[in-house]
Image: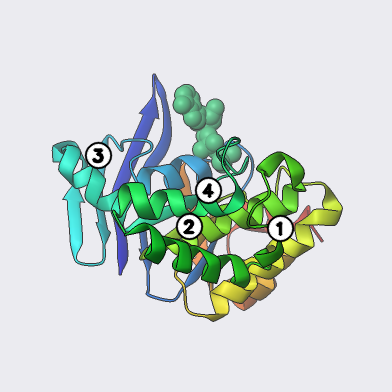
Amino acid sequence: MIQLTNIRKSFGAQQVLQGIDLTVQKGDVVAILGPSGSGKTTLLRCINFLEKPDVGTVRIGSFGVDCRAAGKKDILELRRRTAMVFQHYNLFKHKTVLENVMEGLTVVRKLPREEAKQRSLEVLEKVGLSHKTDAYPSALSGGQQQRVGIARALALNPEVILFDEPTSALDPELVGEVLAVIRRIAREGVTMIIVTHEMAFARDAASHVVFMDGGVIVEQGPPDELFARPQEERTKQFLARFS
Ligand code: ADP
């Protein structure tokens, strides 16, 4: 349902993605692991063209584009099919929790306000924030702010939610509540791709794990296999740091 083919991306002379092929099935929870600087975030951002790949094709559901030929309409269509959860939440500071979630539905999806409100209240309940709908982001903990970020993505009912290190800006005691919410929506069959350093989470919540290093996918597979029996030396060395 999501297919990336030969994705390449350079920043100046540095080739950050060196030809990535990745297939994600509907309902998969894919964890992307790897050392810092290996290209994980760039790959995630290439899926919705927050970074434009230099070469390759991106297919999401029935819609595919050749990156070199992609125009504005193609990019909008890819964005319509995806939603992203950012490391630093990226909430509107001067809007309430409810308004933050409604924004994409009214402005981008053009839903009538009342319908957008109902949908937003539903997803806020899913992330455990029904009691905070009128609060402003500054009055929330980091974990709560990230749960608003997740609600905002979920409200759009995208074909895939892209998570860019969703817990790495959080104090350690707040990580668990955010991972619990991600686990809960994963169980509902939402397709997700998650760049993360949370090994235990990847091991027990992901259906598929991808290990990247140096701009390539070194190894991938079901978490049980990849964690218990990594085949490649680079994967073994990386995982050994966390055991
Ligand atoms: P990871 O997510 O695995 O830590 P990134 O995808 O963030 O890796 O970065 C991979 C490499 O690309 C790094 O060397 C980083 O400095 C470089 N990079 C990422 N984004 C940009 C950018 N916008 N401009 C220049 N270099 C970048």
Q: Mark 1 points at which residue?
A: 198
Specify whether 20 is left or right of 213: left
Q: Does the residue labelled 4 lie within 8 Å of ligand 1?
A: no
Q: Where is residue 105 in the image (x, y as percent from the top left)?
A: 38, 55
Which three-letter amino acid code belongs to the residue tagged 2? Ala
**Residue 202 seen anywhere in this rendered image of the structure:** no
Q: Nearer the viewer, residue 195 or 86?
A: 86
Q: Which residue is drawn at 57% across and 52% down?
A: 149
Which residue corresponds to the image point at 15% horizontal and 38% vertical from the top-left?
A: 71
- Sequence-earlier tag: 1 or 2: 2
Q: Distance between the residues labelled 1 and 3?
A: 30 Å
* Amino acid type for the residue under numbered disc 3: Val
| Mark 2 in CB contact with mark 4 (< 8 angstroms) | no
Q: Mark 3 points at which residue?
A: 55
Q: Name the residue under label 4.
A: 100
Task: Report the Cα–Cα distance between label 3 and label 4.
Answer: 34 Å
Residue found at x 38% / y 40%: 18
Q: Name the residue under label 2.
A: 153
Q: 10 Å neighbourhood of mark 3: few (<14), some, or many (≥20)?
A: some
Marks 1 and 4, the one that precedes in the sequence: 4
Question: Helix, strand, or loop for circle 2?
Answer: helix
Question: Does label 1 or label 3 sit earlier along the sequence?
Answer: 3
Asked whether the viewer can see residue 10, the reply is yes
Q: Which amino acid does label 4 sit on?
A: Asn
- In the picture, which quadrant includes the N terminus? bottom left
Task: Residue at the far front: name it.
Answer: 114
Badge nearest the viewer, 3 or 2: 2
Which of the labelled discs sits on residue 2, or is there none? none
Q: Nearer the viewer, mark 1 or mark 3?
A: 1
How far apart are the alpha carbons under marks 3 and 2? 27 Å
